[in-house]
């Protein structure tokens, strides 16, 4: 079997809808024919996937692969809700193909969605928290809305699902900051890359000692504070050079540089090309 890249998936959303758990028989043990995603939006409980229990709360995403038995367990006195999505990645199912089977009915292997060997897809966890990743939760909400569209619902839902999977993979495969103190500093850098507060001011904002802040920031982002700020500045510099005709000196000043020569040197070291050549190639 040829190994596939995650970017090669072509999602087809069979069904996407909110679900309120109320001790329905369908919530007991069952097996899916397609890939399934359950984003919990309220309540606490557990989901058993292939005989392993996973705790759930608001923001928990449960990813279930085809042919894997699973069931939902929760407290009746605590309202539990989720958004459920059933989809295919490598093929489109026949019309009216079932997406679930319940005991005592046997699983019909011929009805399972096509599964390709994809190492990147296998990296995606059965259970993860999207609580600190609101943009991913919004993708899930928009997928449901797309399936209700009057025009191009299938295409819109599939495109959103594709984007969601790739962004989710990015959050799993790369370091994503979750510590609120570090997230606050990162947001400040993103909004004001021209501002160089310095290590001491950042530490004061976080309420941390220098060594602790430095270690935590690198642990959360994979970069030092200085490296991260440089990345943000260079990304904005590239956008400014592409999208307007202001002088390179003006771009450097806008990003907080006192010297155009220092800006040009950093830009060249980062992109391997000078700001002026970068602009001319973009044009």
Image (spheres, grey):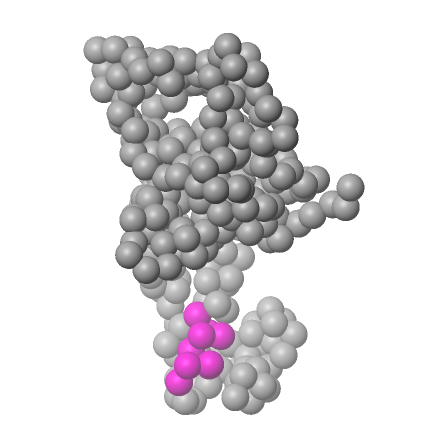
Res 75 seen here: yes
Q: Residue at x 54, y 30 (%)?
A: 33
Query: Which percent across, then down, holds residue 152?
Result: 37, 59
Q: Which of the pair 125/68 is nearer the observer?
A: 68
Q: Residues in magenta?
A: 236-244
Residue 140 in the image: state x and y as whole percent.
37, 43
Name the residue at 29% across, 20% down.
Answer: 21
Residue 240 to residue 139: above or below: below
Indicate the quadrant where residue 179 lies. Answer: top left
What residue is drawn where x is 49% and y is 21%?
101
Determine whether 278 is above or below 211 in the image.
below
* Residue at 28%, 56% in the rendered image: 150
Residue found at the far front of this picture = 95
x and y, in percent, of residue 19 in the image: 30, 29
The quarter of the image holding the N terminus is: top right
Instruction: Decide: is 229 above or below 283.
Output: above
Is 239 colored magenta in this rendering? Answer: yes
Q: Nearer the viewer, residue 171 or 202?
A: 171
Q: Is residue 188 left or right of residue 247?
A: left
Position of 39 relative to 118 (above/below): above
Evaluate whether residue 216 shows in this view: no
Residue 57 location (% of width, % of height): 34, 24
Report the magenta stretch's main SS.
helix
Tally the marks.
0
Q: Is residue 251 left or right of residue 65?
A: left
Is 48 a magenta residue? Answer: no
């Amino acid at each position: 079997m040829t190994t596939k890249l995650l970017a090669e998936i072509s999602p087809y959303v069979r069904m996407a809808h909110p679900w309120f758990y109320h001790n329905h028989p369908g919530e007991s043990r069952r097996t899916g024919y397609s890939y399934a995603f359950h984003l919990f939006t309220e309540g606490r409980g557990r989901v058993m996937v292939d005989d392993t229990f996973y705790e759930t709360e608001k923001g928990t995403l449960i990813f279930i692969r085809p042919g894997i038995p699973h069931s939902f367990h929760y407290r009746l006195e605590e309202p539990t809700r989720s958004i459920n999505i059933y989809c295919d990645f490598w093929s489109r199912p026949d019309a009216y193909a079932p997406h679930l089977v319940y005991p005592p009915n046997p699983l019909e292997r011929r009805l399972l969605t096509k599964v390709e060997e994809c190492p990147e897809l296998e990296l995606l966890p059965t259970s993860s928290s999207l609580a600190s990743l609101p943009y991913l939760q919004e993708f899930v909400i928009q997928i449901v809305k797309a399936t209700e569209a009057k025009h191009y619902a299938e295409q819109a839902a599939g495109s959103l699902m594709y984007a969601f999977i790739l962004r989710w993979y990015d959050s799993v495969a790369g370091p994503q900051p979750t510590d609120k103190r570090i997230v606050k500093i990162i947001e400040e850098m993103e909004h004001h890359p021209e501002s160089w507060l310095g290590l001491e001011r950042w530490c004061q904002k976080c309420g941390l000692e220098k060594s602790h802040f430095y270690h935590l920031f690198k642990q959360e982002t994979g970069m030092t504070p200085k490296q991260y700020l440089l990345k943000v500045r260079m990304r904005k510099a590239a956008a400014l050079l592409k999208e307007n005709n202001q002088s390179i000196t003006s771009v450097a000043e806008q990003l907080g540089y006192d010297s155009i020569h220092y800006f040009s040197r950093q830009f060249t070291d980062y992109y391997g090309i000078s700001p002026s050549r970068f602009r001319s190639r973009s044009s």
